[in-house]
Amino acid sequence: MKDRIFNFNAGPAALPLSVLEEAQRDLLNYKGEGLSVMEMSHRSKTFDKIIKDTENLMKEIMGIPDGYKVLFFQGGATLQFAAVPMNLLPDGKSADYINTGTWSTKAIEEAKKLGKNVNVIASSEDKNFTYIPDGFKLTPDASYLHMTSNNTIYGTQWQKFPETGSVPLICDMSSDINCRKVDVSKFAMIYAGAQKNMGPSGVTIVIIREDLLERSPKNIPTMTSYKIIGGKDSLYNTPPTFGIYLIKLVLEWMKNSGGLSKVEAINRKKADLLYTAIDSTDFYKGTVRKEDRSLMNVTFRLPSEELEQKFIAGAIENNMIGLKGHRSVGGIRASIYNAVPVEAIEALVSYMKDFEKKNS
Ligand SMILES: *Cc1c(COP(=O)(O)O)cnc(C)c1O
């Protein structure tokens, strides 16, 4: 087998090697049961333990207080863009949204498509989403405030979450869930597609305060209803069983690596290595306001698009993939999620120095 490459993909993204190896060991015969997790009933005792363990590990690692449920949905984070207003925004009421990029914009569009009243109370669109806005006013009586904690495409991240008082705060954490400690009690709901920091695509994690389940109206599709899916502990129908099992392995890997504070410290070290390399020369230029820089998606430019293409091609020859910026913004993006090891960043930094020497 060819050695594994350094994977800077934005999503689906790198998974820890030890997790893949464990899944491989379990693949044909899970814990001596003579079958794969993929082949077992979602109603079996064995799978019931897997899903409960996953929920409990999530609560333990994230420090989720009592009174919240951890649910598993399909349909990606994108389905949640619709499910949030369907469940939590009654007709005749309005919700606040903060627009910090493409994914926030999509969440806003999806709510509007459903005929809901949306107030965009802050946006960084004026500067192509290169910063996190502050100084906004909540609409009194808003049903919730929706925000995106990390802007995967632009490379910005909220460093401090807004205070919303009694207005429920709802956050799309798809690209930075479990990259750092957050105070979950500040949020009414957090959701995240698993494929960036938690596991494979096909599972979306929804962490929701239990009192919100009561808001789900009866006339929405079953598969979008927090009340129904929550009431059945994510087992209303067949959940994405193998994906949930992989999330469990990723959480165990996090726990064995020293938990969230250790993972956060490593993430800060990784991001620091890369941003320091960018800032130490004029050849590379970061694309976002410094205080809003993301720990997970590091975006930068080279002096020309030709050099950027050459940089990406040369990186591939050096076993580094996934560095091309999103097609809507161009440039370079290194996604350095939890499972991307420090060695990958060291290899990238060394390649950057070498590339600059040869091309400046
Ligand atoms: C990737 C991403 C999405 C889209 O996720 P899907 O699971 O593909 O629907 C939404 N929000 C953010 C912040 C993302 O990074």
Image (cartoon, rainbow, N blue to C red):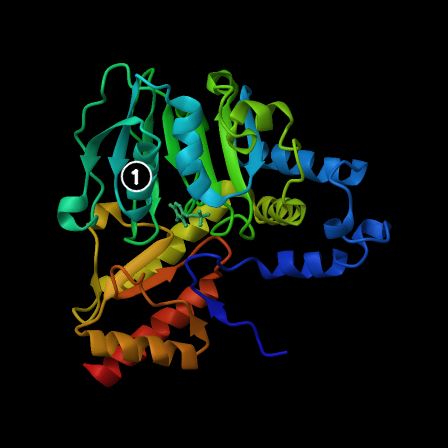
The residue depicted at 18 percent of the width and 28 percent of the height is: 136
In which quadrant of the rendered image does the N terminus lie?
bottom right
Give above or below for 229 relative to 265. above
- State the image coordinates of residue 144 (x, y, percent, origin top left): 34, 23
Q: Is residue 280 visible?
A: yes
Q: Quadrant of the C terminus?
A: bottom left
The answer to whether residue 330 is left or right of residue 35 is left
Q: Residue at x 30, y 16 (%)?
A: 92
Direction left: furthest residue: 126
- Quick check: can you spot residue 158? no
The residue beneath circle 1 is 109
- Above or below residue 156? Residue 86 is above
Q: Position of residue 237 (x, y in %)?
A: 66, 35
The foreground one among 181 and 200 is 200
Where residue 264 appears, as percent x and y from the top left, is 44, 46
Find residue 137 and report its image quarter: top left
* Number of numbered tags placed on the structure image: 1
- Asked whether 358 or 23 is in front, the reply is 23
Compared to residue 232, the image places residue 37 above or below, namely: below
Position of 235 with respect to 208 (left or right) is right
Q: Residue at x 37, y 22 (%)?
A: 89
What kind of residue is marked 1?
A: Glu
In the displayed structure, 279 sits above or below 198; it is: below
Classify mark 1: residues with Cα within 10 Å, few (<14), some (14-19) or many (20+).
Answer: some
Mark 1 and ligand 1: say if the CB distance to the nearest ligand atom is below 8 Å.
Answer: no
- Where is residue 353 drawn, in percent x and y? 29, 75
SS state under label 1: helix
Residue 189 location, quadrant? top left
